[in-house]
Image (cartoon, helix red, strand yellow):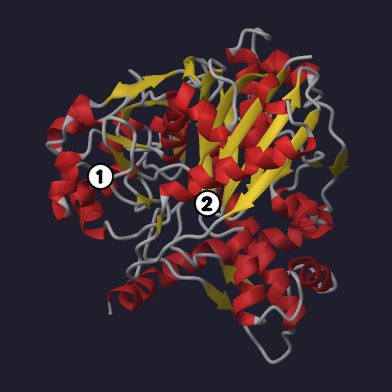
Amino acid sequence: MKRYLGIDLGTSSLKVVIVNQRGEIINSSTINYAVKIPNEGWVEQDPNQWINALKEALADLKKLDSQILQEIHAISVTGQMHGIVPVNPSGQALHDAIIWSDRRNEQELSALQTELTNEEWVAITGNRPNISFTLGKILWVKNHQYGLYEKTDKFLLPKDFLRMQLTGIAETDYSDASATLLLDIRTLNWSEKIISLFQLDRSKFPEIKSSISFSGSITRNSAKMFGLKEGTPVICGCGDAQAQALGNGILHPKDWLCTIGTSGQLFVSTERLAMEKSGKLHTLVHADPGSWVLMGATLSAGMSFKWLAESIFDSQLGIKELLDLASTASAGSKNLLFLPYLFGERSPYMDERAKGTFIGLTNEHTKSDLARAVVEGVLFSLYQSFRIVEETIGEKCKYLVLSGGGAQHDLWVRTAADIFNVPVVRNNSRGGGAYGVAMLAAVGAGDFNTLSQVAEMWGLYQHEMIYDPNTVLHEKYEKLYQVYVSAYDSLKEIFHRLHDS
């Protein structure tokens, strides 16, 4: 039976899974690594640690079956979006990767916002400028390290760097390119207007392909380096948000996905290009050819709870134990609100200067109330995107699939059902984004005709558990939500003054 290898290059770890032709996970491995913070607001990673993590993860797979890597029929990759790796013509990194959470390009962001209005940016790219996007990082390199800019043959996104180590070919895909602020969302080419406006070198951007396209084969050198079989086809791949969606079977307009990982996303597939004109939502290209994505994002979802557990409560309880404790608090956390803007906020504000905030603390609040308020605050942020998506496409959500680490605890799932007021589905974890790109490998290799066919045959439409909303609690949450949505406008000036002081 044919086997497919999916590789997911995350922010904190690299994961690999091997999936057979029936969609069963044969083996998997996860290798953790760290980020570098060389200056305040700078966040980097050494691309060599990604290479070493892939070597180690593949070696783990080989320990249980010495021939397993030689039996891979096709490979595909996904990874963290928005970052840059400047490389020379042979694919060697010339500098540490500047990853999505880096905030050094505030001046460049201001220049982007000055040159075009939000509406003009959305009309070209489907998105408005944000501190995370790739374009600002490239401009920072051009403005502050011009020698590096000149030496760079290609600016690669993280997963594309890793794939180049396998194939020797510099390419990207439409889904990842659509989150750079450089892609013309209608023509699916690099925007000549933006390249010209900011005097960028067009040759420094890789060719763009469909996510299911053949990208290249495992080279002799990479076969030796990683223990893979020379000549194994490598399929282009996609961004991590799209890969998560694939792994959860989110391929049709009726399917809505909410992911609670380090960050959080509200992800909806559409069959036509749909944009929120002011840029409150992201419009991206789906990994499924011919489809689009409307997505809302909050930068600190699971990370907000991790911060509370580790930095505030000093790891007195583990994440699960603290969630169990939060479950004992009443819904609404005694009218305590949490704004999860620890790294600024994306949807709907796109404000890198927003700050995390508790509102309504009294002497009656306990550790359990604070913990529950964080869960509710993250979900309120995603609920904002949910409401805007419904308005933008003119359709109501029928049910919501919840994925990511948050989906593993009942508190997140039940609270999501009560806040969103729709049935929330929890599926068994199938390997996340790495599983999603294993699906791309299966289609790209020609073993299935479409991603929908893979999802059907691999059982992704079979929901394991459904949580129905409590309408009484939803009414309570709706009142709190109205206060929540007014809080940012009330505090925006204070956030900005604190940031700029």
How far from the left and from the top, in percent, is residue 486? 50, 64
At 73% from the left and 77% from the top, the residue drawn is: 369
Q: Is residue 352 above or below residue 137?
A: below
Q: Is residue 448 above or below residue 439?
A: above
Is residue 152 something that shows in the picture?
yes
- In the visual, does 180 lie left or right of 212? left
Residue position marked by numbered label 1 in the rendering: 138
Q: Amino acid at mark 1?
A: Ile
Q: CA distance from mark 2 to mark 1?
A: 19 Å
Q: Quadrant of the C terminus?
A: bottom left
- In the visual, does 92 lie left or right of 151? right
Residue position marked by numbered label 2 in the rendering: 11
Q: Find residue 167 and name its label.
A: none
How far from the left and from the top, in percent, is residue 203? 20, 26
**SS state under label 1:** helix
Please tell me which residue lies in front, 300 or 207.
207
Is residue 387 something that shows in the picture?
no
**SS state under label 2:** loop
- In the visual, does 493 lie left or right of 447? left
How far from the left and from the top, in percent, is residue 268? 59, 33
At 40% from the left and 53% from the top, the residue drawn is: 350
Q: Amino acid at mark 2?
A: Thr
Please tell me which residue lies in front, 390 or 287.
287
